[in-house]
């Protein structure tokens, strides 16, 4: 916000209000970031955009696979314990049902992370098209993304 004099604030408040450029790997990427990237001094803006989205996609996929794999491992161990019980031990259903629910929830979180990764792919396609249109317009004035 502007102070009483109309100047931008300084100090900690000013640091919070300053915009971090797209080159610093901000997320999510906005239209203003794309305009800034097109107007910036980046050698290959489409390559930079691809790198940003590839990094984000890879992060989500690694997390999704880890979480889904952990949940599937829990579920498998639980099913083996229920199907092949020891002769003297009977598995208490009061322990099995919550364990099944927790395993299913963990697998569900992994599936949701996969859905988020698919969304990042769709966002990349749209962002790439917008950036291509902005670059086709020609040189944009520096700072044109600012309000």
Image: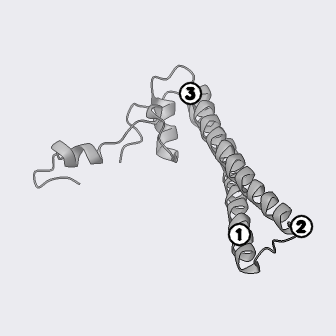
Task: Tell me residue 75's x, y (percent).
Answer: 78, 61
Query: Of circles 2 and 3, which is in front?
Result: 2
**Residue 8 visible (yes or no):** no
Query: Of circles 3 and 1, which is in front?
Result: 1
Task: Tell me residue 27's x, y (percent).
Answer: 50, 45
Left or right of residue 19: residue 98? right
Q: Quadrant of the N terminus?
A: bottom left
Q: Which mark is residue 99?
A: 1
Pick whichever, 86 or 61, lies toward us: 86
Based on the displayed image, in which of its 4 quarters is residue 81 positioned?
bottom right
Determine which residue is flagged by label 3.
45
Picture residue at 35% right of the left edge, 48% below the top: 147
**Residue 120 visible (yes or no):** yes
Mark-to-mark CA distance, 3 and 1:
48 Å
Based on the displayed image, in which of its 4 quarters is residue 83 positioned?
bottom right
Pick whichever, 137 or 65, lies toward us: 65
Which residue is outermost to the bottom?
94
Q: Secondary structure at mark 3?
A: helix
Q: Is residue 34 above or below residue 100?
A: above
Pick whichever, 59 or 76, lies toward us: 76
Picture residue at 72% right of the left edge, 47% below the top: 65
Which residue is outermost to the left?
5
Task: Tell me residue 33's x, y (percent).
Answer: 48, 41
Q: Earlier in the sequence, mark 3 or mark 1?
A: 3
Mark-to-mark CA distance, 2 and 3:
56 Å
Query: Of circles 1 and 2, which is in front?
Result: 2
Q: Earlier in the sequence, mark 1 or mark 2?
A: 2
Which residue is outermost to the top?
43
Determine which residue is flagged by label 2.
83
Q: Are marks 1 and 2 in contact (CB under 8 Å)?
A: no
């Amino acid at each position: 916000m502007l102070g009483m004099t109309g100047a931008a604030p300084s100090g900690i408040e000013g640091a919070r209000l300053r915009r971090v450029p797209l080159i610093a790997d901000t997320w999510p990427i906005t239209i203003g970031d794309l305009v800034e990237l097109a107007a910036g001094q980046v050698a290959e803006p489409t390559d930079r955009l691809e790198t940003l989205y590839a990094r984000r996609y890879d992060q989500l996929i690694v997390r999704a696979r880890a979480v889904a794999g952990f949940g599937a491992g829990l579920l498998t161990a639980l099913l083996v314990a229920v199907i092949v019980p020891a002769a003297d031990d009977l598995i208490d259903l009061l322990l099995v049902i919550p364990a099944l629910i927790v395993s299913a929830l963990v697998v569900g979180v992994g599936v949701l992370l996969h859905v988020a990764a698919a969304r990042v792919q769709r966002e990349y396609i749209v962002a790439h098209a917008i950036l291509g249109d902005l670059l086709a317009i020609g040189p944009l004035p520096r700072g044109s993304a600012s309000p």
